[in-house]
Image (tube, rainbow, N blue to C red):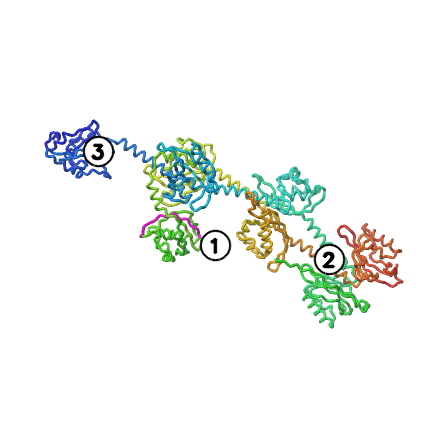
Amino acid sequence: MNPRTNPAFPFVADIAFQDGDFVFATDRFGCLVYWNKEAERISGYRAEEVLGKPYALACRIEPDATTVDLAAILGGRDFAGGVRCHSRSGGAFALYLFATAGRDPAGLPAGVVFVGRDVTGLWRAEEAAAASTNKYRALFEHSIDSVAIAEMDGRVIEANPACLRLYGYTADDVRGMKLADVVAPEDRGAGADAMEKLAAGRLVVKTIRMRRKDGSRFVADLVASVMTVGGERRIMSVTRDVTDRVRAEQARSQSERIYRTVFESANDAVFIESVDGRILDVNRNGCGLLGYRKDELLKMKVADLVPPEARTWLPHVTDAILRDRAFRSEAVNLHKDGRHIPVEISAATMELDGKTAVLVIVRDISERKRAEQGLRESEEKFRSVAEQSPNMIFINQSGRVVYTNQKSADTMGYAQEEFYSPGFDFMQLIAPESVEQIKAVYARHVRGEDVEPYEYTLLTKDGRRIESIITTKLIEYRGAKAILGIITDITERVKADRDLREEKERSQTYLALAGVMLVALDAAGSITLLNRRACEVLGVVEAEALGRNWFDNYIPERSRLRVKEAFASLMAGRIEPVERFENPVLGAGGEERLVVWHNVLLRDRQGRPTGTLSSGEDVTERERAVNALRESEEKYRSVVERASDGICVVQDGRIEYLNPRLAEIAGYAPEELVGKQFIEYLHPDDRATVVDRYRRRLAGENPPSTYRVRILTRSGEAAPVEINAALSTFEDAPADIVLVRDITERAQAEQALRESERHYRSALEAMRDPVHVADADLRIVMVNRAFALWLQQSGLDDAVLGKTVFEAFPFLPDRVREEYRRVFENGETVVTEEETAVGGRSFYTETTKTPVTEQGRVARVLTVVRDLTEQKRLVRVAEETGDVLRAVLDNSPEAIAGECENVLVYANQRFARLFGYDAPADIIGRPASDFDAPLDRERMVGYTRLREQGKDAPTSYSFHGLRRDGTLIPLEATISTYWSLGRLHVLGFIREVEAGRAGS
């Protein structure tokens, strides 16, 4: 039936429309009564197929917010709006519809008339624009760099999540803020300059200090430019936290300064040499040791610095160093003036500019050699005197004879080896009536008392009794207390020598001093700490929550088991803590809140896990706000296209999109990479890692999202990059958004830092002297191996890193604080020498404190410790031996005098009185020939010349002595000689003889 002629629907005949309009009409019940040609064309349904049927079957309008309400239209409320429909073939089309009620002749509503305009093209364009906008919005939101969009006056319009994380603000905080608000006050001038350049339309690129919401500072690379959005000029500010890079550069500079300070402050001469013997570098002490300027030494070879006879030895030394990587020996160096300098060398290999070099530390041991020579000469003098002495001499240590002269063996009838036997009983030499006397004297010596010479009786091996007088003295011998005894046979001269008394002991004793959630859990998962923000998010009171199990009460049930198991593994040490992760928590009323967590594992002193401390940021509202934000395609495209990092979208392994920066990093044009497999441009060694993490993300796991890989550039080079991958959607399908950061400069800086640290550490570790470095709080931040070894050998705790100098060494006197103050405040080098007693042991050190400067101020102090204990011991032993010798000479019953080059350098009391003088001081320094009779002087001088020429001369002879009053006395001399410091010394034992024997 033709609806235009149907009297039931006269309103249809009144429909007015234009060509191309989609027109149809329904009765009061929604059944079609009219369907025009355009409706047939667009929908694919013919009029005879749909008339009389519900209009919804023909139009197939998608239900949404603009659903057509027939009842409302019939009631007089017209409809106008866009609807999406489906054609007979299943294709989608869009109409903009106008609907109004059609009325019968009585004016009552009889149906509805629809007039629509086909807007499918516009709808599809809007859909495409929305999809593109979403794509750039996702890229903007996932950018690693901090991005902010601002008005030209600096007022912030929007900031991406990375920006909010970096500065610690929320999205609400930043709206209305100015870009200058986050510039550190000390760099505000630089910030104002940047705004002036932007106002002029210029690009701004600079490194500047920024300030977070909590007041903390960081160093950032800033790239700011002007873009046009919807006809309006806007500022796009991109900042990147480069604090680590700056610190690495500063650390490298500091490492080089420490190396140079160590190098130049070393107590020893330090040389760096090539393997072919060229001198590459030398410190000040090296120049001072050899007498050359630095520029002179750098033109020389090692062979130029050793005597000719030692040069053939050098290739063997080099081979040993390269083979063993270390070498130590004594050698001789040549001074510029030709002098021979005894040295001790320590050499080790090191890497310098990619080549093997040799670090050589040279120590001048002239002083030690002189001390050793002095000790040998002193011992030789003692033995020479003791063996020539007409008295019996012994040293008793802890009840054992450790030395006795030949005179004792001859007199007592024993061989010297018998005295030294472990089973020899010294008391068997003492007559029974003298045993208690000897024990009492020994006890007095042990108490440190001096004992005057006393008489007692000896028993020889064959039982003979010898009346003796003994002079004893408590001495230091080879580092321990001992008793020196000088015994004179007084059987024939008891009365004459009874008045002899030993001088008081002379000894020395060396004394010396020495806005986020904070949650702490114990190992069982119970809460031990909650801050106010955590209480607010959880909707609890702290006192009620403390002690509760965190997982049972505040983790949603669907996540509880997984989180509990991860925590148990963490406490058991099976896994390491994850630096950042997201977990939901149960808030007030059971509402789930999404929290980003940062965890720190707490340990006891033994390093065992005791719990965790977590900081969490409630990002629930921020995530909702981010999801609600929509910006135009132009704005986000500008952000992505201008990003300083490479960005690409990877879907099913193919690159679906990349920005110009990524193409620039790879060396390709963007169109060359789109559609290609992303993995093809990764270094083969890195592909497995990337694929594994991609698959794990798709499986819902949370693998590390940021890590380093190498990409293959067009030139075939492997460029180091840092990638950050996150799951998103692209054209309604899962995809990976991958951010690629070129870290070539950072990698080079890190490599340079490692090389610099290896450089100075090789020098530091090769030094034989102990070295440690302390910061401004006097905390020890670095020690070398020699320092750790010295602590162990000295009986000190070697766990000193992180402790202050006074915590590590509590025995240090307060003056050390003043020494450090002088170094830090005045920049001066302080050298001190001290004796320290620790655990019953004493050691001597020379300490050199040297400033290490950073940016014009003293930031650290490098301390070099030289252990002088052995050197002091050698000097002390030499002095002790000298004391023993002097005790022997001073206490001898014989008259003894020593001369050198005809000058009297020593005389004991017996000699002075023999020649009529009161004391030795009256005659020491006078010509020795003054005490010879004039007729004997020429003979005495002749003997001396023979000895100086190394020829034989009499060691025993008679002569006449010239007394102070001019009288002559007949004497007999026994001569002992020794050389000291290149000069001949003559020691004479003088005895009076009967007048008839003189001159024989």
Q: Is the stretch drawn in magenta largely helix, strand or loop?
A: strand
Image position of 365 (left or right of 101) = right
- What secondary structure is found at the residue carrying circle 3? strand
Going from N to C along the chain, the mark reached first, 3 or 1, is: 3
Vertical arrangement, residue 290 with respect to residue 125, above or below? below
- What secondary structure is found at the residue carrying circle 1? loop
Mark 3 highlights which residue? 97
Q: Position of residue 705 (x, y in %)?
A: 41, 43
Depth check, mark 3 against mark 2: the one in front is: 3
Task: Give the Cα separation between the discs numbered 3 and 1.
Answer: 74 Å
Which one is nearer the viewer's eye here, 775 or 583?
775
Going from N to C along the chain, the mark reached first, 3 or 2, is: 3
User: What mark, if any, has residue 882 been given in the picture?
Assistant: 2
Mark 1 highlights which residue? 607
Residue 824 part of the magenta segment: no
Residues rendered magenta in the picture = 589-601
State which quarter of the image contains the N terminus.
Answer: top left
Q: Outermost residue, top direction?
A: 19
Vertical arrangement, residue 330 with respect to residue 399, above or below? above
Vertical arrangement, residue 201 with respect to residue 917, above or below? above
Task: Give the Cα separation between the discs numbered 2 and 1.
Answer: 56 Å
Which one is nearer the viewer's eye here, 562 or 128?
128
Can residue 427 be seen in the rendering of this structure? Answer: yes
